[in-house]
Image (cartoon, rainbow, N blue to C red):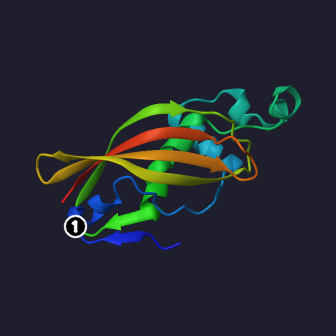
Amino acid sequence: MKPLEFTDFSEFKLMLGKELPTGNWYTITQEMINNFANATLDKQWIHIDEKRAEKESPFKSTVAHGFMSVAMISRMLEEAFTIKSVKMGLNYGINKVRFPSPVPVNSELRMLSSVKEIEELANNGIKVTFSCTIEIKGQQKPACVAEFIAALFE
């Protein structure tokens, strides 16, 4: 999938209230889960102990950390659009984060998103709120729903 391309903020602002392109599917491997566990120091057995999870977990396998799906939002948004004039982007915040469904190892995730709000910032910037839903292939309930906020600067 090719991302939407915008020359500058004035073009991008026309996306307010509209959906962005749906992203690619990502397979969540045990290696990815282990790397996230090591980076965040969250080594709870439901994430990293495959044998124990198979026997004791209600999910019958390891599951990804909820915040791992949140951490993937920035990358998934990069797949949806680019603004050529942007020199720098920052993660500004996240509102209304929910994890309706666990993400078992080897699940495939992708994101649906739309532009909910755009506010002007100082220093040639805008603050963009995206409505994000991270889907799990083959499941009705999503892995994550959130309002992701980015600060972008020209």
Q: Is residue 5 above or below residue 27?
A: below
Residue 112 versus residue 40 in the image, above or below: below
Q: Is residue 153 visible?
A: yes
Image position of 105 (left or right of 82): right
Q: Residue 80, percent across and down?
A: 45, 63
Name the residue that disc number 1 marks: 85
Q: Secondary structure at mark 1?
A: loop
Q: Is residue 126 left or right of residue 75?
A: left
Q: Position of residue 147 (x, y in %)?
A: 43, 39
Percent x, y for residue 67?
54, 36
Q: Position of residue 100 (x, y in %)?
A: 64, 33
Dot 1 crowding, Cα within 10 Å, few <14, some 14–19, many 20+: few
Q: Eyeballing the image, is 22 above or below 64?
A: below
Quadrant in the picture for residue 50: top right
Of residues 87 and 9, the one drawn nearer to the viewer in this rendering: 9
For residue 16, above or below residue 91: below
